[in-house]
Image (tube, rainbow, N blue to C red):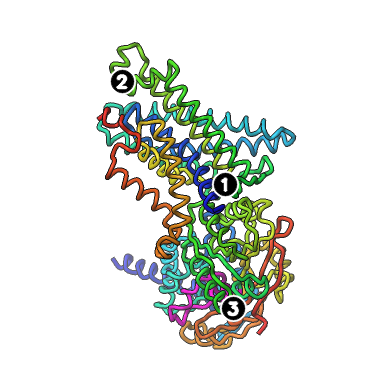
């Protein structure tokens, strides 16, 4: 039983990160109808930037309190990712806003490759290790072990996701975002600066991605220039699973995907009598994607997709 | 017209003379080319350069001996090529070396490059001695030209399996591999060794070289409560895996092959790496027959420490030169059978080849992480 509890917990940790990244996909899709495939790379840049800042701070001010170090690194990463997202949108997507839908999609893949290669040039090809700022403590919870970092991941993700829902549903900015997603032209006629709202949407998504990057770096203690690619695909899957364009759907999709992967990898070998092994872990994610697309193209909570079409 | 023709003859004569100079030194020694291949650029360029220096040192020392083969004084020359650790590049440079009239090749460094290149050397009848390729396939293609001076993964897997069951006393064992040629090969050998030694395989799990999250498979493994976890793969995955093993509260031993016995593993696993076991083919340098001497000689010449396999490249080169001396010929076809019958006291130990070209009685050393560094534990096999 404790093994099952542990798998659920693993799934929740994994799923929280997926959900944070999936929100970035779904927000941009909700407003522009664009799948921003470079989003996974923004997560990687966030992790890399935070690591660079932490390393610098540790060597220059070794006496600094770890909380302050991580806070500064986090702010730097968020800032870098937000400006990166701003420039990507301004330079790569905006000129193509009225182009056929395939053009920005291809551009997004191009940006993704570009960012990976830039990161490879700056930070090298090796796996880089993340210094441990806090001693890892392990707690027992329903017979499962959970580390302080993992608790932190679940808490931070929950806070950020609720914060985002509050912004979108209860603030003036959120109302403008929702209006822009309904119709850019009408929103523009109502006095909303559509370009600004789109930029802000990209930047909020990138901020969440930066935090996700830091959480991943903290949890696994390694970063690599290619770490964003698979994560991006998984988060995209999560967004589609929940219903792309729907914020609550992205959160639900992320958590579900994390649970499916974790439980799948843990039990598939036993269920199939050893016919399929744990190397099919990634396959679950994509089988789920295909099944959802076949039977419920709008996703689990995705009524809005049909509205947009 | 006549002038033109005589000029043409003059040029032709120059070219022929030029060729003559290629195969003979100014003091009348015959030049014999030995090839060397390793990654001289890219992420493991430092290892390739290390091998090159080992081979270069051997060639320089052989030349100082003023060797005479078949009545002709010999001057060896090392032609070194870069394969970038890339299998495709490996075949290109192998062909280039074959075309440059080499009589033998020391290389390549990686298994992935050595195997495809070995076909080219075999087809051209060029004897090959790899200092460091350990994948089984290399010597299992029935190429009479293929040799290596390091224990292979079969021997390593067997030693690891015996060690796990007999020395560490592990009964229930979980295996993870990264599905690469190296990781899967080593894990397969380990698995059969465990079965032979009477251990029990509880599960075999898989991952790949892009992953850093192993919690799902480790949680499953935790439920089986193994005495030991074996990982067939590289340090980049083993580092984070070790952290997650400790975080999940798994007890028991962690054992891996030479891909993990690196400094990078220590960096990536941090404090959680403590207690991990890993093997590496061969002896630690200080325990090699001529290890200390070689280390000092190397450092004096290159002003740098040995990285990893230089002593093996040195031995590989000398084994080849030794075979030429015994055969009294530098002709590849003539000295090849002599190479197979080598019995040479190398820096790394006694070198003899079996019928496949594998090192006979190759030894494997075990290391354990103590206080953040790999500490030598013991060497198994080899003494014969």
- Can residue B70 be spotted in the picture? no
Q: Which mark is residue A220?
A: 1
Distance, label 1 to label 2, CA atoms, is 41 Å
Chain letter of the residue beneath label 1 in the structure image: A
Q: Considering the numbered disc 3 on the image, is that residue within a helix, a strand or a loop? A: helix
Q: Is residue A178 above or below residue B370?
A: above
Q: Is residue B88 above or below residue B124?
A: above
Query: Label 3, on which residue?
Result: B197
Q: Are marks 1 and 3 in contact (CB under 8 Å)?
A: no
Indicate the quadrant where residue A306 lies: top left
Q: Over which residues does the magenta segment extend? A: B130-159
In magenta stretch: residue B354: no
Residue B188 x/y as whole percent: 50, 71
Looking at the rendered image, the quarter that the C terminus of chain B falls into is bottom right
Q: Are marks 1 and 2 in contact (CB under 8 Å)?
A: no
Residue A250 x/y as whole percent: 41, 35
Residue A13 x/y as whole percent: 52, 43
- Looking at marks 1 and 2 on the same chain, the residue that comes earlier in the sequence is marked by 2
Crowding at mark 1 (Cα within 10 Å: few <14, some 14-19, many 20+): many
Q: Considering the numbered disc 1 on the image, is that residue within a helix, a strand or a loop? A: helix
Q: Which mark is residue A171?
A: none
Q: Is residue A257 left or right of residue A149?
A: left
């Amino acid at each position: 039983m404790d093994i099952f509890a542990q798998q659920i917990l693993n799934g929740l940790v994994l799923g929280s990160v997926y959900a944070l990244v999936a929100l970035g996909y779904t927000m941009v899709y909700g407003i522009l109808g664009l799948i921003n495939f470079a989003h996974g790379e923004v997560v990687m840049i966030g992790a890399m930037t935070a690591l660079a800042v932490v390393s610098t701070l540790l060597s220059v001010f070794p006496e600094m309190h770890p909380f302050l170090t991580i806070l500064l690194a986090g702010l730097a990463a968020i800032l870098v990712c937000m400006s990166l997202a701003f420039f990507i949108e301004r330079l790569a997507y905006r000129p193509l806003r009225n182009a056929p839908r395939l053009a920005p999609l291809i551009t997004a893949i191009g940006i993704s490759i570009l960012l990976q290669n830039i990161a490879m040039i700056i930070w090298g090809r090796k796996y880089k290790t993340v210094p441990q700022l806090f001693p890892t403590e392990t707690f027992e919870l329903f017979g499962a072990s959970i580390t302080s970092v993992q608790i932190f991941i679940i808490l931070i993700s929950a806070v950020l996701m609720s914060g985002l829902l509050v912004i979108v549903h209860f603030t003036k900015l959120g109302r403008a975002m929702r209006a822009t997603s309904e119709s850019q032209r009408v929103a523009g006629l109502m006095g909303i600066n559509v370009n600004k709202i789109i930029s802000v949407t990209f930047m909020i998504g990138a901020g969440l991605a930066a935090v996700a990057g830091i959480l991943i770096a903290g949890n696994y203690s390694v970063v690599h220039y290619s770490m964003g690619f698979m994560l991006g695909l998984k988060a995209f899957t999560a967004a589609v699973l929940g219903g792309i364009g729907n914020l609550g759907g992205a959160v639900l999709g992320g958590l579900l995907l994390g649970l499916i992967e974790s439980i799948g990898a843990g039990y598939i070998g036993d269920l199939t009598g050893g016919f399929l092994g744990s190397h099919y872990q990634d396959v679950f994610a994509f089988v789920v994607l295909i099944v959802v697309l076949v039977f419920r193209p709008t996703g689990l909570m995705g009524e809005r997709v049909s509205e947009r079409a | 017209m006549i002038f033109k023709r005589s000029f043409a003859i003059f040029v032709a004569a120059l070219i022929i003379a030029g060729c003559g100079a290629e195969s003979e030194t100014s003091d009348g020694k015959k030049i014999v080319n030995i090839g060397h291949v390793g990654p001289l650029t890219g992420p493991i360029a430092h290892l390739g350069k290390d091998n090159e220096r080992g081979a270069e040192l051997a060639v320089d020392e052989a030349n100082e001996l003023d060797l005479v083969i078949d009545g002709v004084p010999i001057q060896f020359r090392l032609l070194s090529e870069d394969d970038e650790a890339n299998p495709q590049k490996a075949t290109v440079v192998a062909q280039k070396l074959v075309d440059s009239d080499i009589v033998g090749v020391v290389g390549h460094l990686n298994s992935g490059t050595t195997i495809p290149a070995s076909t080219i050397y075999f087809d051209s009848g060029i004897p090959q001695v790899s200092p460091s390729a350990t994948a089984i396939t290399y010597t299992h293609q029935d190429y009479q030209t293929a040799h290596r001076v390091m224990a292979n993964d079969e021997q390593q897997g067997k030693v690891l399996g015996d060690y796990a069951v007999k020395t560490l006393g592990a009964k229930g064992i979980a295996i993870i591999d990264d599905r690469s040629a190296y990781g899967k090969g080593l894990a397969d050998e380990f698995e059969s060794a465990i079965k032979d030694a009477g251990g029990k395989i509880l599960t075999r799990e898989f991952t790949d070289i892009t992953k850093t999250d192993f919690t799902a498979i480790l949680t499953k493994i935790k439920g089986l409560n193994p005495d030991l976890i074996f990982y067939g793969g590289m340090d980049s995955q083993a580092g984070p895996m070790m952290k997650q093993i400790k975080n999940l509260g798994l007890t028991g031993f962690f054992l891996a092959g030479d891909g993990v016995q690196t400094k990078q593993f220590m960096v990536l696993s941090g404090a959680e790496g403590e207690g991990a076991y890993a093997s590496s083919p061969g002896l630690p340098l200080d325990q090699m027959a001529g290890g200390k001497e070689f280390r000092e000689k190397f450092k004096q010449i290159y002003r740098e420490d040995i990285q990893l396999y230089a002593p093996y490249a040195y031995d590989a080169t000398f084994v080849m030169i030794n075979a030429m001396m015994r055969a009294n010929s530098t002709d590849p076809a003539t000295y090849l059978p002599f190479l197979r019958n080598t019995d040479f006291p190398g820096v790394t130990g006694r070198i003899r080849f079996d019928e496949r070209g594998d090192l006979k009685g190759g030894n494997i050393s075990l290391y354990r992480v103590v206080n953040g560094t790999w500490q030598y534990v013991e060497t198994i096999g080899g003494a014969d």
